[in-house]
Amino acid sequence: MVILAQGWLIWKLTGTELLLGALGLCMAVPSMSLTLLGGAIADKSELRRLLMLLESVAAFILLVLAVLSVTGLVQVWHIFAAAFVFGVIQAFDQPGRQALFPHLVDRSEMMRAVSLSSTIWPATRIVGPALAGFIIDRVGSAAQSPGVGVGAAFFIAALGFILFGWFLSLLRVPAFERSGGRNILREVAEGVRFVWEHKVFKFLTLLNFMTVFFVVTHVTLMPVFVSEILHGEASLLGSLHAAGGIGSLLGALIAAHLGSFRGRGALIMGTAAVQALCVVLFALSSTISISMVLQFLAGFCHALFMVCSQSTVQMQVPDKFRGRMMAIWGMNYGVVFPLGQMQMGTVANLTRTYLSGILGRVAGAPSAVILGASIMIGFVFLTFRNLRGLNVPNSERQGD
């Protein structure tokens, strides 16, 4: 809901793809600076209390945005300031969440646990954006003020963060090994070195970053596709997000039944390529029904890719490095996604401004999405030789 409401508000206030991308950059700056530190703190902290604090701050920021939107006082800089704070929160929240949940399940159930955890994002993508789009349209129309509609969406999103904080207060976490070092910067460096020296971790992290940077960030430009190509409103924007969410949820649920699937290397590489292809076709589509189907397929492939790759990492990483490993892994949405947003917005703006005569209909948002997804497809084919190393985790080969 927050992603859709912020993007829609920026687009309506400014009408420029560049600022849609810059919104992502505003989140990336603090995340890039603090995520590794967040991972080191996650390896030391009482994770439940840390996460409760972060959810409270996020809810407060959304309530402020809601009031500003409803009163008509909201300005572009308010949205960017909120995005910056969310970037700070993300730097500590993501590694904390990822470090916490594996301690709630047996290691033998890790693939299913990762799959179920992976349903959170797609499941909320089904309900959240569709609900946000509906509220923005209906409440805004009833109040004859689009700002009131956006404000209502922010209010409900704030309630979600409050509820999550309350759920965390009920959670009881078993004791587990924590990092014993006292030098935070040294522990951050040890975490980076650990990932760099393990080939599987290094390659999967790079593949994950590439997918998010060049493919997943096409959603940044979704307001442009809805307004200028599909000629819809916020409700259609929510429906497109929901279609991707339904595909992701189905993919995550299917992945939950794969267990220790020995062909996961082919599945990881194949779904990364097919997702990128679906996004290219989406950029070329001018029909709502086809765009819906392509979003569904892209979401389905992305979920399979994420569950298989993340479960491979979770099953092999030692507990004392888990927070730092997942902090680096989690930079996909805290750092890489916002930077990819900036890349998408910049390319779209440049091609629309300088290459519209050459590119024609695909100038702007379509050309940015096609370029990014095509780079991803090329990367997958160039690195396909890494497939064998991903098929069976080392711990399973050794019978651990």
Image (cartoon, rainbow, N blue to C red):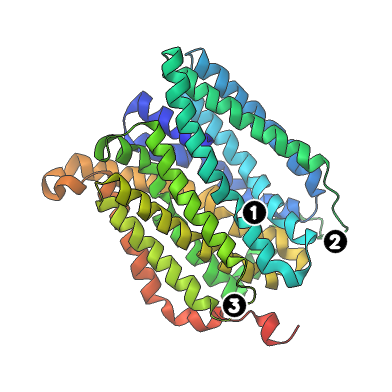
Residue farthest along the right direction in this orientation: 175
For this rendering, which residue is in front, 157 or 26?
157
Choose top left, top right, bottom left or bottom right for residue 257.
Answer: bottom right
Q: Secondary structure at mark 2?
A: loop
Residue occupied by mark 3:
261
Q: Amino acid at mark 2?
A: Phe
For mark 2, does the 10 Å Cα neighbourhood hold few (<14), some (14 to 19), or many (20 or more) residues? few
Q: Which mark is residue 176?
A: 2
Report whether 268 appears left or right of 169.
left
Q: Mark 3 vs mark 1: which is more N-terminal?
A: 1
For mark 3, does the 10 Å Cα neighbourhood hold few (<14), some (14 to 19), or many (20 or more) residues? some
Q: Nearer the viewer, mark 3 or mark 1?
A: 3
Report whether 181 appears left or right of 268.
right
Residue occupied by mark 1:
36
Q: Quadrant of the C terminus?
A: bottom right
Identify the residue shown where x is 54% and y is 55%.
Answer: 249
Q: Mark 1 vs mark 2: which is more N-terminal?
A: 1
Identify the residue shown where x is 21% and y is 41%.
Answer: 352
Q: Confirm whether residue 338 shows in the render.
A: yes
